[in-house]
Amino acid sequence: MNLNNELAPPAESSGRNEEDILLLKRIGDRDELALTSLYDKYSKILYSLTMRILKSVDDAEGIIHDIFLEVWNKPNDYQSNKGSFFSWLMNMTRNRSLTRKRSRSMHKQSHMAELNSLSFHTETHHGGASSSSLIDEYRDSVLGAINKLNGEEQQVLILAYYEGYSQSEIGRIVNLPIDVIKFRIDDALRTISSQLQRRS
Amino acid sequence: MSSHDEKYSGSCAGYAIGALDGKDLQEFEAHLKEGCASCGSELSILKEASALLPVTIPQLNPSPELKERIEFSARLSQIVRKDIDKTEEEQVEQPDEHPDIKPAVKAKHSAIVMGMLIAMIVMLIGFSVYIYSLFRTLEDQKNAGVGTQALLVKAVEELERKNIILDVFNSRDLKLIQLHGTEFNPDGYGQLIWDPAAQTAVLHVDNLPQAAGGKVYILWVSINRQYLFAQQCSLITEWGAQNYFQIKFAKNIDANDFEEIFATQEFNDKVSYPSEQRYLFYKKVK
Ligand SMILES: [Zn+2]
């Protein structure tokens, strides 16, 4: 299956990215308000992601602190030809959180305990008072796509995305061949990607 | 389905969320290096989609202090950088035939040091432990008569050291090696974060006592029962007991080859064999 003809990045996300690039440019000119704007825009979802992975306020806030400080000190590290600023930021946050998680859990390995807590939050959830336009904008589509996945695909996606396991580690955890895991990851992510495309 | 699709398209999603490993990962990375436009474009679409997955998790608000901390740290790094740039400019622009300029420069410097002191006090209330310990150390050095400019240079070096660690953390493949305390130093703790692709590592140490008079800490690794001098970590004696170091090895090393890693205190960096007392220790489990 080839996605390229079927899918292009959603149109409204390119508008958001232009805004972000302008903010980065202002950060390059040492405009502290631009950093604050970026923080107001993305801190909530980045923090929620680190908390989902690490379940520790101290660790999560430490990671978010370091990431925003790095954006402040090196705004040119983001290259717009490699995708949106938002996905770059999310990817960096996720990588750091997973690295911290791995270093923390080197002593205690508890695959089974983690398996019990594996589920996407498929109810509509508005946390906190402040709303985020990005979350409002995409939540329903992503939830719709996740609800189209069967339980096994959801499980594999969670193990890979939030727990940071590789395909062979997941294969060992759920006792299935790597090819099956690989197929489930592929199918799950493509389902979500197509659904996002359809909405725009 | 073409052989290309069968072999590579199925790897795009796994690669996009970092789940690909082993032979699949090697083959797919080699294929990307060849510049396959189709995979490159699929990958970027799937990466964007995966970045949106967390919109469905419960949304939590970080504490209001986090925002203050970030704004404060940003301002702090700004002050430090600005002053370094300024000092360098002044040195170029104001040679010795303008001696009347110097008191003004000095006044500016002491205002900045004053600012740092205030910053330090604010940070005592609970701001970033890292920057707090950095400034506490700067203050100790100031009391020991180290010049303002030297302190500022150190501050920037230290911030850059932190950035190196962050870069290493962002790498795709990392090996984490945990170092433990020993009978001489039961609370000692360390972590070697090893990036095999870059042949570089970051050592994070905590709870090491001050090195005895005239001695420095040295990190050793043993490979095939040979001791390799890895790095002198002399900063520990100057910068407090918690620290980060960038480690570079002279030759290519596979992290799996490490048999032992440990830290000792030595009189200088030219020793060829480690002394007995070890302060941090890792031993490969056979
Ligand atoms: Zn290809």
Image (tube, coloured by chain):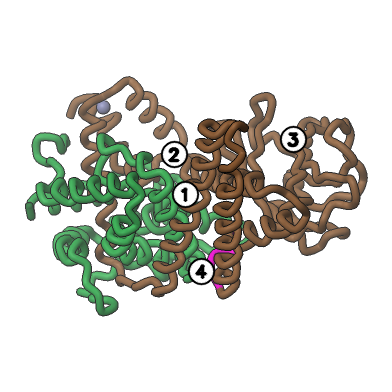
Chain colours: A green, B brown
Q: Are marks 1 and 2 on the same chain?
A: no
Element marked by disc 4? helix
Distance CA(mark 1)–CA(mark 2): 9 Å
Rendering coords of residue B117 (x, y %): 61, 64
Tell me whether marks 4 and 2 sit on the same chain: no
Q: Residue at x 76, y 52 (%)?
A: B145
What chain does badge 3 belong to? Answer: B
Mark 3 C-beta to ligand 1 under 8 Å: no
User: On screen, B150 above or below A110?
Assistant: above
Mark pair 4, 2: CA separation: 31 Å
Q: Amino acid at mark 3?
A: Ala
Name the mark on residue B230: 3
Judging depth in this view, the residue of B214 and A98 nearest the camera is B214
Say which amino acid is labelled 4: Asp
Q: Which residue is mark 4?
A: A58
Judging from the image, what secondary structure is the residue with disc 2 in?
loop
Pointer 2: what residue?
B21
- Name the mark nearer the viewer: 1 or 4: 4
Determine the residue positioned at 58% across, 61% down.
B116
Determine whether label 3 and label 4 are within 8 Å by CB: no
Same-subunit check for callouts 3 and 1: no
Determine whether label 4 and label 2 are within 8 Å by CB. no
> Disc 2: which chain?
B
Residue of label 1: A169
Give the residue type at disc 2: Asp
The Cα–Cα distance between marks 2 and 3, rounded to whole angstroms, is 30 Å
Q: What range is drawn magenta here?
A: B126-130
